[in-house]
Amino acid sequence: MTTSVEQLATHRRLSARLQASWPEFAAKRQQRLVQADRLGRAAEKVAENIIEDLFTGPLDWSRSDVKYQVECASDFDGGTVQAREAAATRQRS
């Protein structure tokens, strides 16, 4: 006996959750994209927020399950977030 994916209860629940939560996610996404246009170089943070909204909304992850790649993040000119923070600290000293 072969069971198709559509027959699985887990698939049906996920599909129903995605359909129910997608309009709210899409509205939040649009608001985030407006932020990106307004803030310019904040695009990386806006993208991070959209991904967080996706995982914690439609995909039903808890916020504690989201792992941010802070040490791997870089800006458009190739500098890492960590290097920018260190430079800013040196300038304040």
Image (spheres, helix red, strand yellow):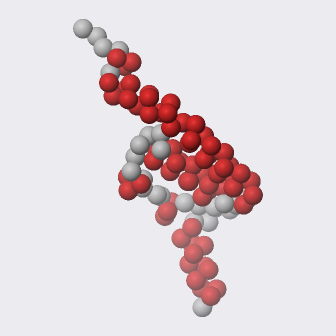
* Residue drawn at 75 percent across, 58 percent down: 38
Q: Relative to residue 13, is residue 24 drawn left or right?
A: right
Q: Does residue 51 lie above or below 12 as drawn?
A: below
Q: Does residue 72 lie above or below 18 as drawn?
A: below
Q: Does residue 48 lie above or below 77 as drawn?
A: above
User: Where does the N terminus fall, quadrant-wise?
Assistant: top left
Where's residue 68, x and y in %? Answer: 46, 58
Q: Relative to residue 18, is residue 40 drawn left or right?
A: right
Q: In the image as oriented, which residue stretches furthest toward the bottom?
A: 93
* Residue drawn at 49 percent across, 33 percent down: 20
Q: Relative to residue 26, is residue 65 drawn left or right?
A: left
* Residue drawn at 56 percent across, 78 percent down: 86
* Residue drawn at 61 percent across, 79 percent down: 87
> In this view of the protein, can residue 76 be seen by the observer?
no
> In this view of the protein, can residue 90 be seen by the observer?
yes
Where's residue 22, x and y in %? Answer: 54, 36
Where's residue 73, x and y in %? Answer: 55, 60
Quarter of the image for residue 78 reads: bottom right
- In the rendered picture of this protein, how many numbered marks are placed on residues? 0
User: Where does the C terminus fall, quadrant-wise?
Assistant: bottom right
Where's residue 49, x and y in %? Answer: 56, 53
Quarter of the image for residue 43 reads: bottom right
Q: In the image as oriented, which residue stretches furthest toward the left?
A: 1
